[in-house]
Image: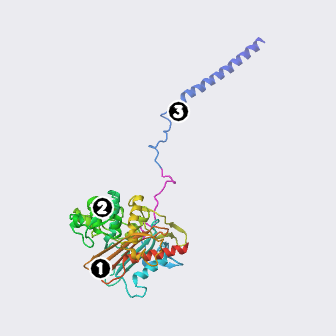
Amino acid sequence: MIRRMRRTTRHRLLTFSALLLLALAIAGVWAIVGEPDASSAPPEATSASTPELASDTEEKPVVDPRDGLTLDPEQFELVDGAYLQRLADGRVVHLTLVPELQRSIEKQLNSRDGGGKYKVPHGGVVALEAATGRVLAIVSASHGSQAVEHYALRAQAPSASVFKLVTAAALLEFAQIDPDRPVCYKGGSQYLSEDEIRGDSVSQEDHCATLSEALGWSINAVISRLALNNLSKEDLEEMASSFGFNREIPFELPVQVSEATFVDDDVERARTAAGFWNVNLSPMHGALIASALRNDGVIMRPTLVDRIEDAQGRVLFTSKPEPWLTTVTAARAKTLSQLAESTTTNGSAAKAFSKRKEWPADLKVTGKTGTLANKSPALTFTWFVGATTGDTDIAVGALITNTPKWWFKGMHAAANAILTYDKIVRRSK
């Protein structure tokens, strides 16, 4: 029995020894292998060791299909009461033009009373919505041996007194002048002498006018003197640029740049500020300037494109209003608009607008006339740029270029365009 106990004890010792040896063996292996150290571990992914991949959700630059799109008025079609142009690649561009307004202006610029008795040598009218930049009508007329294509987009004519709007904006913005303070003057109706600009002969100045009256009646002596005494060359350059001069106008048809040059000579520069040469303007640009009067000083990007469709009629692009330039603050734009409204109420264009027999009493228009004659060739440039101030939204730039025998002016073309469109809007309500 004792022997059996010894065997049992020896067996247990052997079993325990075996287990102990097994445990030691396992511990030895673990000590040899151990946890992987930092040198043997794979490096962590870092921005330096892992190249960045472009995300599928990364925003891509938005491409405006109008950029690089050049339309051709010769290919405009009137289909189901709307204008469109079919492109060579099968796309169809639906246009913003209002057919009734477009045809009315075309008829006027190409004949007197529609009877073919009289045609203006050159004329251009552009009408657009001030709030959106949508072009409602664009008409060019040019007859005779010296016909000019796309006259509404050409800045070949001097801006004349239309530039007084830009000068007035600069006076309000940079000089903070009191628009109700009268300035006394003498002469300057057709030509501006240095004495008339500087006001050296004060005792002979027997007329006085406020800025509003100077705009309404286009009084050169007042505007030029205010510019001489209050505006620098840089002031005029900055405000001209704010109104789009010396800039490319973004549009689906090529528009000639309206150039404005201001010399160092202060008297000559004052003449320019009053509208005597050195500044050219296109009817398209004139309409944009007028739109700022209505649209709180903001000029929207003009567009002829309502939408673009593919050959199957799927809409690829729909135009949306896009600001282009900010001219002055909204408050100063309102002041400028109020000052310029005198042009159509009791100023140089009153007979074509508010005093016209059939003119609606609630159709208010602000704007500016301009007239300048060229000796060679003998042409007279007559302008009106203006915009409505009420519910009907339209801004117009109208230029009529005439020979010495003429009757039709830019203000007549603009007034007819505004009146026609106002009737269209009223009928649609």
Q: As displayed, is residue 88 above or below residue 332?
A: below
Identify the secondary structure beneath mark 2: helix
* Badge 2 amino acid: Glu
- The amino acid beneath tag 3 is Pro
Which label sits in the foreground, 3 or 1?
Answer: 1
Badge 2 crowding class, 10 Å Cα cut-off, few under 14, some 14 to 19, many 20 or more, is: some
Q: Could you tell me residue 237's position as x and y percent?
A: 30, 61
The residue where tag 3 is placed is 36
Q: Is residue 55 magenta?
A: yes
Using the numbered discs, state the Cα–Cα distance from disc 2 to disc 1 in whole angstroms: 28 Å
**Could one spot residue 284 in this view of the protein?**
no
Quick one: label 3, few (<14), some, or many (20+) residues within 10 Å?
A: few
* Magenta stretch: helix, strand or loop mostly: loop
**Secondary structure state at the residue bearing disc 3:** loop
Residue type at numbered disc 1: Leu
For disc 1, the neighbor class at 10 Å (few under 14, some 14 to 19, many from 20) is some
Residue 237's label in the rendered image is 2
The reply to whether callout 3 and callout 2 are in contact (CB within 8 Å) is no
Which tag, 3 or 1, sits closer to the chain's start? 3
Q: Position of residue 52 (x, y in %)?
A: 47, 48
Magenta stretch contains residue 54: yes
| Foreground of the two, 283 or 295 | 295
Q: Residue 379 got which mark? A: 1
Name the residue nearer the viewer: 358 or 298.
358
Q: Are marks 2 and 1 in contact (CB under 8 Å)?
A: no
In magenta, the rendered stretch is 53-69
Residue depicted at x 50% and y 38%: 42
Name which of mark 2 and mark 1 comes first in the sequence: 2
